[in-house]
């Protein structure tokens, strides 16, 4: 399971970090960034929402991975569900996940087995001074790492009363940290993708091994804010390039689009396990599988 979602996790994680940095690095006198942060805070006030996500990864125009998913979340009840379909080199696959108050239920599209895992309960752990200090430290860290990106952002007033904020970074404008860490992260991701490419149980994305001239060429971020000052849509496009061992040039493009709807009125789908084939997975089992996976990977290096 860890390797299966590693590709998606890192891809979305890197893009998400850029989007987070987009907001976290805002300076007080940046009008555009102030508009974005205000909408972000307003969106977080909604206690439930539906997110429609699309992700694609291409290499020289050829599709390596596509993913479409819908997530419904209710923060008050601590429940939610995800319905996702993805296509890799082995074809189309799907999965469902249900987040209940005390457990997580996962089902692969081609299986009748529902895997039930314990959920860590954090509802009774309110924020304290230490949490607030860590949050402030992370804000400062991202502001330092990503630099003053606000000067490159723009805001546009739309006819429907909403706004669109945009950030476009060329190679020379991308923070040095991203350019330095990019080759390391990509190399690990490519290594894992090759390991999983021959297994139907793992996500099969055959990334090219880029050995020279790796760089992040361009980053495009956009956010659509509605007339209620809530984020309606957010997208990111990241362009990467490099050459493999044979000298062939590769241009990769990672695209992520997220649309939010039904803010404050979303009702997540629930799962009734009565009469269904259930496989229980304890928290300790998950920890052991995680440790074994990392031990195996470490031994192979």
Image (cartoon, rainbow, N blue to C red):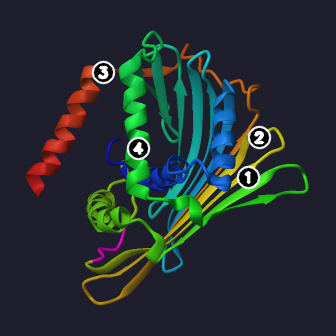
Residue 207 magenta: yes
**What separation in Å lies between label 3 and label 1 (alpha carbons)?**
39 Å
Q: Secondary structure at mark 4?
A: helix
Q: Which residue is mark 3?
A: 283
* Foreground disc of the pair 3, 1: 1
Q: Position of residue 6 (x, y in %)?
A: 36, 50
Regarding residue 252, the answer to whether it shows in the image is no
**What separation in Å lies between label 4 and label 1 (alpha carbons)?**
26 Å
**What separation in Å lies between label 2 and label 4 (alpha carbons)?**
25 Å
Q: Are marks 3 and 1 in contact (CB under 8 Å)?
A: no
Q: Which residues are magenta?
A: 206-210
Q: From the viewer's perspective, tell me whether residue 163 is left or right of residue 38.
A: right
**What separation in Å lies between label 2 and label 3 (alpha carbons)?**
40 Å
**What separation in Å lies between label 4 and label 3 (alpha carbons)?**
34 Å
Q: Which residue is mark 1?
A: 224
Q: Earlier in the sequence, mark 3 or mark 1?
A: 1
């Amino acid at each position: 399971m860890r390797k299966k979602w590693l590709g998606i996790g890192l891809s979305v994680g890197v893009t998400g970090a850029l989007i987070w940095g987009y907001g976290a690095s805002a300076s007080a006198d940046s009008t555009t960034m102030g508009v974005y942060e205000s909408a972000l805070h307003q969106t977080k006030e909604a206690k439930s929402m539906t997110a429609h996500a699309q992700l694609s990864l291409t290499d020289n125009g050829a599709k390596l991975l596509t993913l479409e998913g819908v997530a419904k979340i209710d923060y008050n009840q601590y429940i939610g569900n995800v319905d996702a379909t993805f296509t890799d080199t082995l074809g189309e696959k799907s999965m469902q996940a249900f987040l209940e108050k005390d457990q997580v239920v996962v089902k692969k599209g081609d299986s009748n087995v529902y895997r039930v895992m314990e959920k860590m309960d954090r509802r009774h752990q309110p924020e304290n001074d230490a949490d607030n200090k860590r949050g402030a430290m992370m804000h400062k860290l991202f502001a330092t790492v990503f630099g003053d990106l606000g000067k490159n952002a723009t805001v546009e007033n739309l006819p429907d009363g909403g706004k669109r904020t945009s950030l476009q970074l060329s190679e020379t404008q991308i923070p040095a940290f991203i350019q330095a860490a990019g080759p390391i992260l990509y190399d690990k991701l490519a290594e894992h993708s090759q390991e999983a490419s021959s297994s139907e149980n793992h996500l099969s994305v055959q990334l090219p091994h880029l050995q020279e001239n790796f760089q992040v060429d361009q980053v495009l971020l956009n956010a659509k804010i509605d007339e209620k000052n809530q984020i309606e849509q957010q997208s990111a496009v990241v362009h990467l390039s490099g050459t493999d061992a044979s000298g062939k040039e590769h241009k990769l493009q990672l695209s992520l689009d997220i649309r939010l709807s039904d803010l404050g009125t979303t009702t997540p789908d629930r799962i009734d396990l009565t009469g269904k084939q259930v496989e229980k997975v304890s928290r300790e089992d998950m920890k052991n599988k995680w440790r074994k996976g990392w031990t195996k990977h470490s031994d192979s290096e």
